[in-house]
Amino acid sequence: MSDSKQKLALYGGRPEICEPAEALFHWPIVTPEDEAAVLGVLRAGTMSGTEITRQFETEFADYMELPFALATCNGTAAIQAALWACGIGAGDEIICPSMTYWASALPALMLGATVNFADIDARSLCIDPADIEGRIGARTKALVVVHYAGHPCDMDPIMEIARRRGIMVIEDMSHAHGSLYKGTKCGTFGDIAAMSMMAGKSFPIGEAGMIVTGNRQLYERCVAFGHYERTGVATRWNRQDGLITDPELAPYRGVPLGAAKHRVNQICSAMGRVQLKRYPQRIEEIQQAMNCFWDQLADLPGLKAHRIESGSGSTMGGWYYPQGLYRAEELGGLSCARFCEAMRAEGVSDCAPGGNDPLHLHPVFHNADIFHMGQPTVLAFGQRDVRQGRGTLPVSERIRESVVTVPWFKHYEPEQIRIYVRAFRKVVTNHDQIL
């Protein structure tokens, strides 16, 4: 029976997907080599050491084609250290897209700064370059850009604005390990980049983060912020590494200036070394699988691919958290929520409206008194009041109406992918049943 004459499962029809193909989505891929690396750390009892971590950092820096990489306990720690390294402190401001995970912005509050949120581009779902410059003020120190769902930000205009206005650029590439912007890896354009490597990411090593930069001063500041055992003080437990050469940091060797312990567990580092060897091939297969999915839906109304146009030299990396761009007006006004409900009835369990909820509306960026100072932390250190209410960032605020999550295929299995394609085609071409 053709798509246009099928009864939707939402109304008692037969679901298109009765037995989900779990192998299509299994992640991370753990091989005997991963297991041997992890067991080696456990048996040696070196979970809290740094030797394997240093090897991983060197290899990851080579992968990124940058001189410096520093592993952290998670991505949030990486972003906080990067913010501090860029000079963010009490009374300062950063600019960040509103539609992102909280860790892209919230660490700024812990440094006494505030966040001036920018809107996103409706097509890329990344920060809109046109909404940046008007937000720069006298205390704006840094711009955090997020390569959302693997899609690279438009870095050319972003870097032009930042350099002309003298502000630092921090790339949050937690979604974009291996993504390219015009042939160059994301994470290498700004002053510093930070990322998560938790188990759900496209580069998954358990629970970890990474900082990369081409600037030695920023690298040393990140070391000084949360890696007390690597600042150059020799003890009976730590060799003298001599990582800190900056004379402003040298007096504080031996303790973390961020009062934080960012050391990563070497179990994760050991797994990271193995995962890195296979990562380019794995994301190539993910690219092939996701493009196979979207190519077969290209003629449908109402649902557009969130991906890079071919031939641009840009890529989606590991396609972490893949999205579809929903256009209700092309489907008779069918709401995104109702569309997703129909998709789930067909067996596409991970179809849901929206990406991350817009942060500029969250009370923590309006009212939270984190330091018990009697006023909101976003104002407590003399910052401008840049708080924004509903209606100020319209693209971010419509995210639950304009975006749907789609399956994240990890393996290129065309016949299995085609079943999911049929499910989407079925709902789109029979949307009048819902209306």
Image: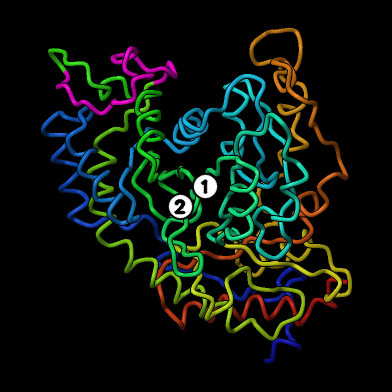
Q: Are marks 2 and 1 in contact (CB under 8 Å)?
A: yes
Of residues 336 and 360, the one nearer the viewer is 360
Given the current orientation, which residue lies at the most extreme front position? 164
Quadrant in which residue 333 is drawn: bottom right
Left or right for 229, reference 104: left
Indicate the position of residue 156 as horizontal and vertical percent values. Answer: 59, 60
Looking at the rendered structure, the secondary structure element under dot 2 is loop
Left or right for 153, reference 315: right
Q: Name the residue type under label 2.
A: Gly
Looking at the rendered structure, the secondary structure element under dot 1 is strand
Indicate the position of residue 112 as horizontal and vertical percent values. Answer: 62, 20
Of residues 205 and 308, the one nearer the viewer is 308
What are the residue bounds of the magenta stretch?
Answer: 238-260
| Number of other residues with Cα within 10 Å of mark 2, as a class: few under 14, some 14 to 19, many 20 or more | many
Q: Residue at x 49, y 74 (%)?
A: 313
Mark found first going from the N terminus, 2 or 1: 1
Q: Residue at x 40, y 45 (%)?
A: 197
Indicate the position of residue 329 as horizontal and vertical percent values. Answer: 86, 72
Indicate the position of residue 286 as horizontal and vertical percent values. Answer: 43, 69
Asked if residue 68 is positioned above or below residue 138 in the image, the reply reads below
Asked if residue 397 is positioned above or below residue 86 in the image, the reply reads below
Q: Residue at x 70, y 67 (%)?
A: 325
Which label was assigned to residue 171? Answer: 1
Q: Residue at x 59, y 58 (%)?
A: 153
| Number of other residues with Cα within 10 Å of mark 1, as a class: few under 14, some 14 to 19, many 20 or more | many
Whether residue 256 is in magenta: the answer is yes
Which label was assigned to residue 187? Answer: 2
